[in-house]
Image: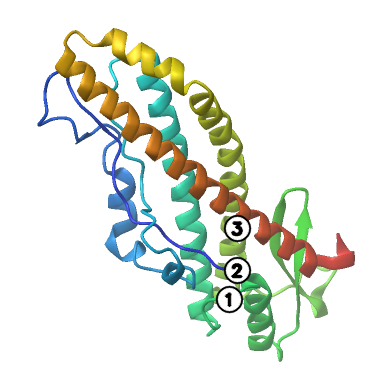
Amino acid sequence: MSFFIPFCCCFSCKKPDDHETEREPLLGSRQTEQNGPASARQTLSVAQNDGCKRRGKLMMRRVGVPDLDQRFLDVAETFNEQQHRFETTVHLLLNLQKRYACAHGGTLALTNILKKIRDEHADADYRISMRLKGYDFSLCVIQTSSEGTKDAEPLPYHLKRAIDEFKDISESAKAIIAKGTTLQELIGWLLRSKDHMDEQVKVAADTFQEQGRLSENLKENMNEVERAKELSMEYRQKAGELFIEAADIAGPHL
């Protein structure tokens, strides 16, 4: 499974006729502060293939039409949340790969991690498997000697941690897909309404100079919308691949 943690930017807004405030953050820097600079540099394998495609939080500008500004804000918030979930998924997979000495990159991340976990506990009295229930997958650990009794010993710390991380990966992947569905609906409306938005922005401007600036802002926003559409589909596809892999591992035990 190849994942990439994107770089962080911001969604920004300007006051009318104020060039200096046009790029001030509107959504704030909470996500950047939480993830820190290190997370933006972590990859599994896909970063080298990205070329010049810019990744990171959406950067939007005010276009002077309240309804449109809100729609662009909704796109930015939804995309940035989806991206945050994607980064979380990558971070969790990287942690598991590092802890269990898995090779980074390539595909079948869950398969390789599960194999390493089983190998590490091969001498223990555990049956370790993948369980898929509905849209949730989890790491299932059963102490065979105590199966069906209340005498099971506490699991080792790293094994309990792996169970929690598999659960978090599943929840984040599910959120990626859900946010992707919402985002495609929001983006679809904007792409279908482009010509009408051009006219709305021109009417909203008080001066010719402001009209030119707001029209340029709209153009830049639509470029960001196209970028969000492409990256969102990529995130959603990779999250879906995780569920497909989990289902393959779980096999006939579904």
Q: Earlier in the sequence, mark 3 or mark 2?
A: 2
Residue linked to disc 3: 238
Q: Please indicate whether residue 152 sits to the left or right of residue 15 in the image.
A: right
Amino acid type, residue under disc 3 in the picture:
Lys
Residue linked to disc 2: 1
Cα–Cα gap, marks 3 and 2: 7 Å
Amino acid type, residue under disc 1 in the picture:
Gly
- Give x and y (percent) for residue 39: 36, 63
> Within 10 angstroms of label 1, few (less than 14), some, or many (20 or more) residues?
few
Q: In the rendered image, is residue 191 in sight? A: yes
Residue 144 image-quadrant placement? bottom right
Of helix, strand and loop, which one carries label 2?
Answer: loop
As drawn, 220 above or below 108: above
Residue 201 image-quadrant placement? top left
Residue at 53% in and 73% down: 96
Residue at 22% in and 22% down: 212
Is the Cβ of the residue at disc 2 closer than 8 Å to that at disc 1? yes
Residue linked to disc 1: 106
Cα–Cα gap, marks 1 and 3: 12 Å
- Give x and y (percent) for residue 203: 30, 8
Amino acid type, residue under disc 2 in the picture:
Met
Q: Please indicate whether residue 9 sits to the left or right of residue 70 in the image.
A: left
Q: Quadrant of the N terminus?
A: bottom right
As drawn, 253 above or below 235: below
Q: Earlier in the sequence, mark 2 or mark 1?
A: 2
